[in-house]
Each structure stands twice: as structure tokens, then as C-alpha cells.
Image: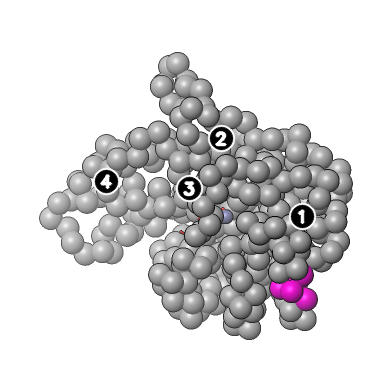
Amino acid sequence: MNTREMFKKAVAGGYAIPAFNFNTMEQMQAIVQAAVETKSPVIMQVSKGARNYANGTILRNLAKGAVEYAKELGCEKPEIVLHLDHGDSFELCKDCIDNGFSSVMIDGSSLPYEDNIALTKQVVDYAHQFDVTVEAELGVLAGVEDEVVAEESHYTKPEEVIDFATRTGCDSLAISIGTSHGAYKFKPEQCTRDPKTGKLVPPPLAFDVLHEIENKLPGFPIVLHGSSSVPQDEVDTINKFGGNLPDAVGIPEEQLREASKSAVCKINIDSDSRLAMTAAIRQYLAEHPDHFDPRQYLKPARENMKKMYIHKIVNVLGSDGKLG
Ligand code: G3H
Ligand code: 13P
Ligand code: ZN
């Protein structure tokens, strides 16, 4: 299904739909199990990097399998969107639309304003012929956006959003209010330190900018990228068992919980899944040096990701119990 009704209900209901990236079968299985057990709608998203890694044909068939798998697990009418994350060209979006994706993102955020509008509109005009919904982006996130590196974040300008949404016809808008991609969202000098734990405390999200945007576009679906929380227990496990992730820091979950109650109706999480998987695998291999069957260490990795997905759905985004 596409995102139209899903977002309308989420904005009205004050919760957000989880958008989890996947590259592997284990991530797909964990996402589906978590969504079924919590009775949550879910967006499974594929980046250009995921397509390069796993092959686009394989990923979209995994997503088809995900729907069948959800039914097999007892969910009569699963609500699963297959979404292209950070599409960077019309051709890539068209390829996904032609091959069964129900939603695409065209990320023209690094382009000059008028060029972003033109590219987004071209994708919207094509996608809407097939009832595929389109996410656009205005404002630049700090960190690495696929292959586009943004050193600084440029908050979305609220004065631009009406013009942008009207002229492009996009169905949802990703905005920049201080989130950022990856496990190192802020430099230590941008943060303070908790005197007790020594851990970094990041600067708060720009809720004033979010509220101004909501006032300009009442009820319009807003998307947050770069919303992993970088759980410190996973980082600690990784570091304990041979990893080296000093000063990794994410977005505090209370702030995401607050954002979910607003017009923010899609929250993107990828890095937390990577951390959950890596922590479980590092621990397992360190504790079982004689094991070498991938199923032995991928099973706890899948369980750890599932636990994380359920936690996000129930305790952060509030999308549990929101099916049909
Ligand atoms: O926003 C980027 C997503 O986390 C996807 O990352 O391009 O490394 O697959 P990726
Ligand atoms: P994180 O790196 O914070 O998980 O963000 C993922 C994302 O925005 C995917 O588009
Ligand atoms: Zn993103």
C-alpha cells in the first residue's frame, strides 16, 4: 500500500509510522515480526546503497515475501509500504515505481531551491499516475546523506514550505530540524557531557521550526530522517567485545516521542538496527569462539533487532495497535 491513508491516520492520531531500512533477510524478518506482534503499520525502506549491496530485484521480492510472511504470522491485513529512501534521480525513482514500490523519496535537498522543485515535480507527476506516493526533502541534514555529504545542517525554512508543497504536489515532506544521519550525529563540541556518566548530551531538536512548519501546512505529513537514538547499551556492548565507537551519539527518545505527537508521521531509523545487529554478533562470536555457522550468530542478531523495533514502535512512535 502507499502512505496516503497511513499518514492521514497517523497525523490525526498523534503517532508516527516507523520507517526501517533493510538490506538483509534477517532485518526484513525482524521488522515483520515486530510489526505483526505490535499490530503496527510499517514502512520498509530501501536505499540506493541497499540496492547496490543486495540487488534491487532481490530486495523487492523480499518485501513481497514480507507481506506473505506477515499473513503467515497471523496478521490478516498487514499494512506494509515498500519505499525508496533517498532517491537521487528521476530514473531511479521511475525504476522503483515501475517495479512495484508503493512509495518513493526524491531527495533534491542538496539542489538549489528551484531545481529541487522541478525534480520533485517530475517524480510526483510520474508517480501519481500509478498511485505511488512521493516524499520530498527541504532543508539539509548534517552528516552523510547517502553520497551527499553535508557538513552543516540547514534547518528547513518555514517560509518556503507552502510554495514547495503546492508547486511540487508532494505527499509528504522531510524537514531538517537538527536530526542527522549515522551513529555520530553531533560533534562532541556541539554537546554537553553528563557529569555522572561522561556521556554526550546532544543539543535539542528545533521544535520551534517544526511548529512553524505545522502552522504553515496544517495536517501535512512531515518526515524526520536521521532519527536513530544510538542506544548506549548497544554501543557499550560493541565496545566491550572488540568494537571502537567512541562518542557515538543519537537523538534522545523523549524528543522523538514528542515529535511523533505532532504532524511528524514517519520517523526513519537505520543506524539503531545496525548497532543492534553488530552488538549481538560481536557478543556472540566473542562468547562462542568455536562457532562458525552464520545461523548461530544471525539468530541472536535478528532477535536483538526485533526487540529494538518493538521498543521503538511501542515506547517511542506509538504506532502499536494502529492496524486497519
Ligand atoms: O539515510 C541513509 C540510510 O541510513 C541508508 O544508508 O545509504 O548506507 O544504505 P545507506
Ligand atoms: P539514522 O542514521 O539516524 O538511522 O537515519 C536513517 C535515515 O534517515 C534513513 O533515511
Ligand atoms: Zn535519511
Residue 280 in sight: yes
The label nearer to you, 4 versus 1, is 1
First in sequence: mark 3 or mark 1?
Answer: 3
Q: Which residue is mark 4?
A: 283
The residue indicated by pointer 2 is 252
Region of the chain picked out in magenta, as a range: 120-125
**In the picture shown, does residue 147 fall above or below 142?**
below
Callout 1 amino acid: Pro
Judge the density around disc 2: few (<14), some (14-19), many (≥20) Cα neighbours within 10 Å.
some
Q: Nearer the viewer, mark 3 or mark 4?
A: 3
Quote the CA–CA distance across marks 3 and 4. Answer: 22 Å
For marks 2 and 3 on the same chain, the one whose residue lies earlier in the sequence: 3
- Locate residue 322, reporting x and y percent: 70, 55
Q: State yes or no: discs 4 and 2 in contact (Cβ < 8 Å).
A: no
Residue 41, how many percent across, how many down? 65, 60
**Among the 4 quarters of the image, the one containing residue 8:** bottom right
Taking the magenta stretch, the answer to whether it contains residue 43 is: no
From where the camera sits, is residue 33 visible? Answer: no
**Between tags 3 and 1, which lies in front?**
3
Q: Amino acid at mark 2?
A: Pro
Name the residue: 34% across, 50% down.
278
Question: What amino acid does circle 3 point to?
Answer: Gly
Residue type beneath disc 4:
Gln
- Please tell me which of labels 3 and 4 falls first in the chain: 3
**Residue in the image at 50% along x and 40% along y:** 185
- Residue named by callout 1: 221
> What is the spatial separation of the Cα atoms under label 2 and label 3, in whole angstroms?
14 Å
- Residue designated by label 3: 182
Q: Earlier in the sequence, mark 4 or mark 2?
A: 2
